[in-house]
Amino acid sequence: MKFKQVDSADIDERIMNLLLYADPSKDMIKNYLPKGICIVGKYRRKPIGVAVLLKVSSAVWELKNIAIAKDYQGKGHGKELLQKTLEEAKGRNAESIEVGTGNSSIDQLAFYQKQGFRISEVIPDFFTDHYEEEIIENGIVCRDMIRLYMDLLSE
C-alpha cells in the first residue's frame, strides 16, 4: 500500500465513504477532519484505507478514524495503515496515542489490543448521547465508548 497525506478539502466521495465505515456520522467527521491529519492508503491507485490523526496536546494524539474497504479487510492492510499512522505521530513528538471505539465493535477492540493498545476507560452512553441514529453491530446496541491508549515511548 502507498500512503499520501490528504488535505480535508481534497476528500472525495470514495474517501468519505471509507471514513463512514468507522464513524457513521458525516457531521462528526466534518467536524474533526479539518483539524486532523488525514492519511490515505492506496492499493493499485485505488484508495482502500484512511486514517485521521488529531493532536490532543503536545504529547498526546488521537486516532479519530481508521478504516479499510471491506474487500481489503483481513489482509494486513489495517495493521500497515495503523503502523504508518503511529510513525506519523512519533514524527510529531507524540508520546502516546489514544483511540475510542464502541462497546459493540468486537473486531475493532480485538484489532487495537493485538496491536498493543490498552483499555483506559469506558464512557457510558457516549453513542446514545452523541449520535442521532441507533448503532447496532454484531447484534449489540452501541452505547458506550471504550477508550484505549498506546505508550509510544516504550515502542
Image (tube, rainbow, N blue to C red):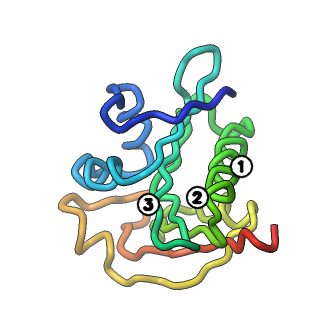
How far apart in space, not on screen, are marks 1 and 2 (Cα)?
15 Å
Query: Vertically, is 123 above or below 148?
Result: below
N-term mark: 1 or 2? 1
Q: Residues within 10 Å of mark 2 (few under 14, many from 20)?
A: some
Q: Amino acid at mark 2?
A: Gln
Residue sitting nearer the eye, 131 or 5: 5
Q: Residue 48 appears in which quarter of the rendering?
A: top right
Instruction: Describe residue 84's horizontal placement relative to residue 105 as left or right.
Output: right
Quarter of the picture holding the C terminus: bottom right
Say what secondary structure mark 2 lies in: helix
Residue 78, given in percent of the width and then of the height, sits at: 65, 43
Kindly identify the residue that appears in the image at 70 percent across and 51 percent down: 87
Residue extending farthest to the right is 155
Say what secondary structure mark 1 lies in: helix
Instruction: Name the residue tied to disc 1.
Output: 83
Instruction: Name the residue tied to disc 3.
Output: 139
Instruction: Describe residue 49's horizontal placement relative to residue 125 as left or right.
Output: right
Q: Amino acid at mark 3?
A: Gly
N-term mark: 2 or 3? 2
